[in-house]
Image (spheres, helix red, strand yellow):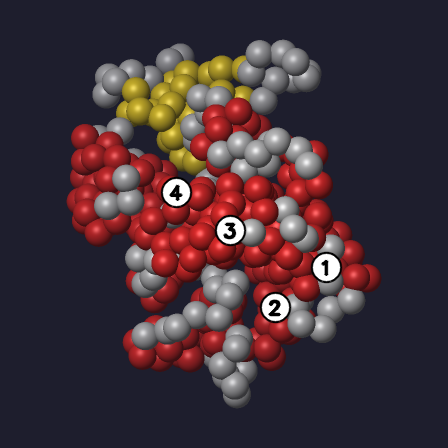
Amino acid sequence: MLLGLEAIKGVSGCPVLSLRSFWAFLFPGVCCFLSVPLNAQDVVFLQADQPGVTPRKKSGQILDYTARQLVLRQSSGREVALEASQVLEVKTKKLPTHVKADQAFSEQRLREALDLYREAAKEEDRTWVRHEIKAMQVWCYRHLGSFDGAAKVFLAILQEEPQMRHFDAIPLAWTSVRLTSTAKQVGEAWLTAADNSIATLIAASWLLTTPGSGGRNALRRLANVKDARVAFLARAQQWRTKVVSAKRKDVSQWQEVVRRMPSALRAGPYYVVGRTLARLDDHEHAAIALLRIPILYPRQRALSVQALMSVARSLESVKREEQAVSIYRELLIDYPEAGLRSEIEQRLERLSGA
């Protein structure tokens, strides 16, 4: 994997490192949600007031944590509300079942992880932690390819916490997907749910490439709603229909929209931008957009696979065989569940003989 955005431009010659090496380099020891002894206080690390200064730290009991704020009760009994955007890291206690679930998820034992997360959600009495656990259920369903399962849990969290901190888990489709008959029926029902713009957005993404589904009309409506999260994502979803026809000026406009989006929601839009730039033979900038996905959004595993395959094929097309081989090998090691071993091995064999 290429190191940093300047090295991502290394499709023209910079060193290649693994995704794991890049992640360790970029975020040494950083985690959003760490386990501490059960009798310990919660610890919140906040952005420093000035660059280069050690992050601020506050201890106490976290009472609530949403996309807008974190409410902390300090040892004095005083409650303080902290802006969520200032929170760098949280250390809190985890129940044993929660710890086991995280371990299973990290090892891609997804069905086991899902069962453990369900159990952990029943055991956990802190609402904000329970939402964290349920968000991980969404990721499990997504990695298992169950769009309707993921969406139902996601919408259930949203009903309890409209300003949910885990909105990035929204199970949108950014490529054509094969829906089960149940998921298709659910999507068709949600597409006309005038009272739930987020359910409609999810359904429109699933059914966008289905002729006569009404997905395109739904996205046009949603692009003008007050909820900025929905509006941004609806606009980006519309770009999917223009990948084969967009001009360079169109992509420049898309990139400006992406820059204005919340950073947590940019993975899918980066994918559409990258694929379109690749079609326009701008392989350098396509790689920059696409490689952001596995590097910055590691939970987006299915999209990461698509992005990495696209980059590797682009590298092949511009005769950067060494970098293409590196990415294909990363795919075999880091994404064994993708079912691409046969295709990748054939490509590696051809490249080794080139």
Label 2 environment density (alpha carbons within 10 Å; few <14, some 14–19, many ≥20): many
In this rendering, position of residue 141 left or right of residue 259:
left
Q: Give the mark nearest the N terminus, 3 or 1.
A: 1
Name the residue: 43% across, 36% down.
65
Q: Select label 4 or label 3 by which is in front.
A: 3
Task: Identify residue for label 1.
Answer: 281
Question: Disc 3 marks which amino acid?
Answer: Gly
Residue sitting at 40 percent across and 53 percent down?
345
Q: Is mark 2 on a helix, strand or loop?
A: helix
Q: How far apart are marks 4 and 3 (CA)?
A: 24 Å
Sequence order check: which comes first, mark 2 or mark 4?
Answer: 2
Q: Residue 234: x, y in percent?
A: 60, 65
Crowd band around label 3 with a 10 angstrom C-alpha radius: few (<14), some (14–19), many (20+): few
Q: Estimate the x, y position of residue 68 in percent, counting from the top left.
A: 53, 39
Which label's residue is closer to the chain start, 4 or 1?
A: 1
Residue for badge 4: 334
* Local secondary structure at mark 1: loop
